[in-house]
Image (cartoon, rainbow, N blue to C red):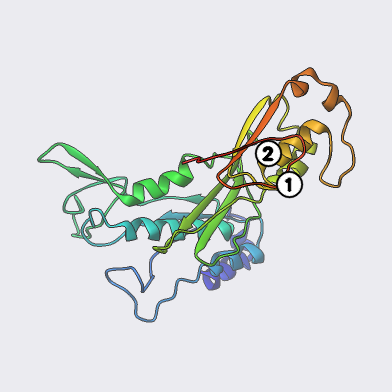
Amino acid sequence: MFQRARVLLSDPAASRFIWGLAFHWYGDPRLEDWPDPGGQVCFENVRHVHEFRPGVHLIMTEACQEATPKLGDWGVGERYGESIIKDLNNWTEGWIDWNLVLDLEGGPNHAGNYCTALIIADIESDELLFQSSYYYMGHFSRYIKPGAFRVACASNRDSLEVTAFLNPDGTLVTVVMNRTAKLQGFRARSAFKLLQIDQELDLLAGVRNVADLCAAPGGWSQVLAMRLLGVGVDGKPLDTRLVEDEVHQSARIVAVDKYKMQPIEGVVQVEGDIT
C-alpha cells in the first residue's frame, strides 16, 4: 500500500488530483479462506501513508469474510473488530463493508465469489440472521458519529484493543475489544482529560445528577465533583461563577461500588452489589 501511495503522491502532476486513497483488507494469512502464506497484516502501512502526506484522506472501502456464510462464528466478528480498531488508530477516516445482506449460499454472485455478510437472508424461511460481525460493526457505527475526532487512547493490557473518539456533540466514545476467553477488568481513565476539554468547551454545563458505577479516584464522580466545586485539574480554582450557579448547587453526585472506596470530596458514596 505505502509503496504505491508514495509513487502517486510524489508525482506533482498526479497528486494534485488526489483527495484521498482507498484500500481493502485482504491478504490476512490468519483468517482468509484463500490465504497468502507469505502475507502479513501490516496495519502500520496505513499510518505510513498518513505520515508521508498527512492531508490525504484514507478510507477502507472493501472488506468481507470470504467463502460461504459462517453462521454463528464469533471469530468473524473479532476480525472486523480488530481491523476497524487498528485501521481507525492508524488514521483511517471511513470503513466500508462490501456486503450488507447475502443469502445462505453467500450470494447471489455471478462469478461464484461467495462471501459472508453482516446479515444473512434465509429466503425459504423469510428470516434474517444477524451475524457477529453485525454487532461488532454496531459498536462503532452506532456511537462514533460523522465529524468525530479520534483522541489518544491506550490500554495497559495487550489483550484489550481500544480506540476512542470525541463526537461533535461532545460525547466521548471508547470502544474496547477483548478477544481472549479471560474476563478482563477495564476502567476508563479519560475523566481528567475530559475535565481539561470541558474547561475550554463547557461540555458539562447544566449537569445536575450523576451516578458513577465502579467509582474510583480519577473517575467520573471525582471529575464532576471537581467541576461543580470549581476546582481544576491543576488544583487551582476555576471560574467562581460555576460554584454560585444554582444549577450546580442543586446537583447530586453519587458513586456506587461493590467494594469500600477511598473518600472522594463532594461525592456521596454508596457500597453494595451493583450487578
Say which of marks 1 and 2 sits in front.
2
Q: Is residue 128 above or below residue 37?
A: above
Which one is nearer the viewer's eye here, 219 or 121?
A: 219
In this figure, which residue is indicated by the disc labeled 2? 221
Relative to 234, is 119 on the left or the right? left
Q: Quadrant of residue 209?
A: top right
Q: Quadrant of residue 52?
A: bottom right
In this figure, which residue is indicated by the disc labeled 1? 192
- Point 38% across, 70% down: residue: 27
What's the residue type where badge 2 is placed? Ser
List x then y, in percent, for residue 107. 20, 51
Which one is nearer the viewer's eye here, 164 or 209?
A: 209
List x then y, in percent, for residue 182. 42, 63
What's the residue type where badge 1 is placed? Phe
Q: How many marks?
A: 2
- Point 29% across, 49% down: residue: 131
SS at mark 1 in the image = helix
Q: Quadrant of residue 100?
A: top left
Residue 64 visible in the current orientation: no
Which one is nearer the viewer's eye here, 63 or 242?
A: 242
Q: Is there CB contact under 8 Å for labels 1 and 2?
A: no
SS at mark 2 in the image = helix
Determine crowd level at label 1: few under 14, some 14-19, many 20+ residues with C-alpha closer than 10 A.
some
Q: CA distance from mark 1 to mark 2?
A: 11 Å
